[in-house]
Amino acid sequence: MNHLKNILLISCVSLSFATVSNAQHAAATDTAKAHHPAQHVRRQSSATAVIVDKKEASTFFNAENYWAALEAYLQVYKDTPKDFLVNYRIGISYLKTKVGKAKAVPYLEYAAKQKEAPKDAYLNLGKAYHYANRFDDAISSYNTYKELNKLKGDALITVDRLLEMCENAKELVAKPVDATFENLGKSINTPTADYAPYINSSETYMIFSSQRPANTGGSYDNPEDLGQYPSDVYFTTMKDGAWQKAKNIGFNVNTEESEECVGLNAAGDKMILFFDSKNEFSDLYLSLLKTKQWQKPETMGPNINSKSVESGGTLSSNGNTFIFSSDRKGGIGGKDLYKTKRLPNGDWGTPENLGPTINSIFDEDGPFLTPDDKTLYFSSKGFNSMGGYDFFKSDYDAEKDEWSEPINLGYPINTTDDNLYMSITADKKRIYLAQQREDGLGDLDIYKVTLNSEPGGSRHLFMVQGNVNADSATDGRVKITLKDTSGKTIGIYNTKATGGKFIMFIPIGKYHLTADSKGYKPYSDDFTITDKMQPADLQKSILLSR
């Protein structure tokens, strides 16, 4: 069961909050393990190309093949438009898919009014209204559900959280963020799900996950197998200002089962992968790019991977800090974000929970650190989410060693559906994310979102690229230190003394740079960053001499 599958299976309830007790967490984990072999996004069975009857439609629905069930029940509906069960299951099938959830409204409106309606009819109608941005109608339906069922305990808390999300949504939609969406087109997107886009710091390389028929694992047509397409990882490069046709990343990474990229470092040569298959249960792996070829992924080790679910992850620019999501015991909510540092022997140390500023009593996932390591973007079902996961940002104060209160990125960057896995350019002006929108090709599509004004404000950062060479060949290392005029260390960069490269992301100001390598004279340089810098001014060449 891959990440997107996990989202889709619970999409009908993704507006609700995550389980918080350890006992419930353990039960959920055991349930997840029992679902092997891996399941993926439901796809229409070839059997739905012929006329189906109500019994066959029910078979698809009971097998949780909601794509096939939707097509089948829509056929049955033509002859039985007043059948409450047909209406109800069409509505549920729309809610369970990633396409057109708001289309469930008229079917659930009809079903909820019938005497035979299931107890959760008004709950699901409320969710359909919620997805359609009809928040007052959603609030009314949720309250009707509460009254009819005399809720208490966790069930009452869940609905109250849905009501709270509606109020959050009303506020966010009333003050939309100034942002422009650009669908990346057919060179990247397909009628099936394309999602979780990650770019390198120079915005010249992008990796994403896709569930298309031509994937390494092929497809399955049997409705009992849920008509699934396994996920593969794809990549694309930027040429002349346009993303080129996406290519499969290759057999070193992609297998017969599902693989998903859930993180990429700033340099674009370290990829975090999520595996959930027969042999690996919801674990994180690392693949390295060597000689233009991605290497076979290796586990990130026992301090990161556990018997619980480990999902999205992000590396610091120097590769020595890793932030990831896990629903392991002892957390604040369901999934929490944790931080671990690399030990001298190369292993990862004991993870540390990022604490209640970042982690809510609900789920957090999909962390992404900006190249300057100053801002953390992540997804959360908590705080002032407008429905399911929303994207948030938090800034890090190195002196206080603390994160700022998370800021919701706002509507329409966030929607009432799940918003999970994104990356942002070094200047924090463009976001890459996946959404299902009116101009899309069918399922989740990848978009470039230009922020005309960033939520919460932001310093403009300049990308300074440099290279290091020595007057004689050496395999040694060089330590580059950057300080501001007050003597405060802005960053430390380690690279090779011969042919080494480094990237710095810094705001306007005056700086002092030093470079030290064993056997070579110390190197220093003072420079200034202004708002009128040209690309050539942002290049640094360091020559070390003995």
Image: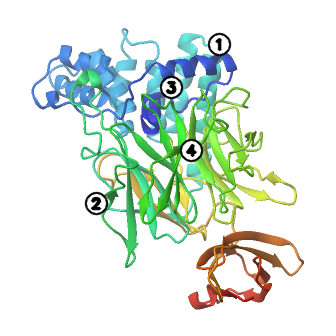
Q: How far apart in space, not on screen, are marks 2 and 3 (Cα)? A: 39 Å
What residue sits right under mark 3 in the picture? Answer: 141
Q: Which residue is mark 4?
A: 312
Q: Earlier in the sequence, mark 2 or mark 1?
A: 1
Sequence-earlier tag: 3 or 4: 3
Q: Quadrant of residue 193?
A: top left
User: Earlier along the polypeptide chain: callout 4 or callout 2?
Assistant: 2
**Location of residue 468 in the rendering, given as x and y in whole percent from the top left corner:** 64, 82
Percent across and percent down for residue 267 are: 56, 66
Question: Which sits earlier in the primary sequence, circle 3 or circle 1?
Answer: 3
Q: Label 4 sits on what residue type?
A: Gly
Q: Position of residue 254 (x, y in %)?
A: 37, 46
Query: Secondary structure beneath disc 4?
Result: strand
Compared with 407, 169 (above or below) is: above
Location of the N terminus by quadrant is top left
Q: Which residue is mark 1?
A: 152
Q: Could you tell whether 94 is left or right of 163 in the image?
A: left
- The amino acid on which the numbered mark 3 sits, given as a three-letter code, is Ser
Q: Foreground mark, 3 or 1?
A: 1
Q: Which tag, 4 or 1, sits closer to the chain's start?
A: 1
